[in-house]
Image (spheres, grey):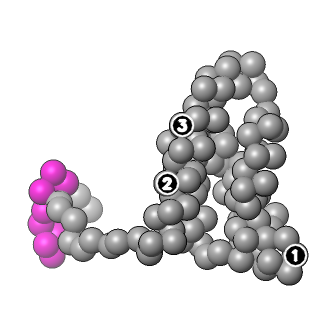
Amino acid sequence: MHFFKKKLLFPVKLHEIKRFFTTNLPDDVVVIQQMIKKFSEEVIKPVASRNDQENRFPAKEIEQLGEMGCMGIGASSDFGGSNLNTLTLSVIVEELSKTCASVGAICSIHNCLYVN
């Protein structure tokens, strides 16, 4: 039997897929999400295009994220980290990446590979 002719258990077309569940973020994560969204729009977005065109590392913006506690999300507060969870990190990276994928990637890589 050809692989693509195999019958699906639940045949469905992609445009028919609906969300099967909804999840509300905890209130503290929503507050952080709003804070990062505002920071992204006001600080990162205005310089993102120029940074990309000039191959410039966003050092000033990353330093500001560090001051906000976003560069040590999972680290214990004993070591200067924010002592937050992976959900919070995911929300932060998502909001940063909406305005500049590079900044979102830097934050993600720093937190996931370096800090943890």
The main secondary structure of the magenta stretch is: loop
Label 3: state its secondary structure: helix
Q: Which residue is mark 3?
A: 41
Q: How many marks?
A: 3
Q: Is 10 contained in the magenta span?
A: yes
Residue 79 - label: 1
**In which quadrant will I find the N terminus?**
bottom left
Label 2: state its secondary structure: helix
The magenta segment: 7-16
**In which quadrant will I find the C terminus?**
bottom right
Q: What x and y, as percent, mark residue 60?
A: 80, 37
Label 1: state its secondary structure: helix
Residue in the foreground of this view, choosing between 52 and 83: 83
User: At x 50% / y 42%, what residue is drawn?
Assistant: 98
Q: What x and y, as percent, mark residue 93?
A: 58, 54
Q: Residue furthest right?
A: 79
Q: Is 63 contained in the magenta span?
A: no
Q: Which residue is mark 2?
A: 34
Earlier residue among tags 1 and 3 = 3
Is disc 1 surrounded by few (<14), some (14 to 19) or many (20+) residues within 10 Å? few
Question: Mark 3 and mark 2: span between their CA atoms?
Answer: 11 Å
Instruction: Tell me which amino acid carries mark 3.
Output: Glu
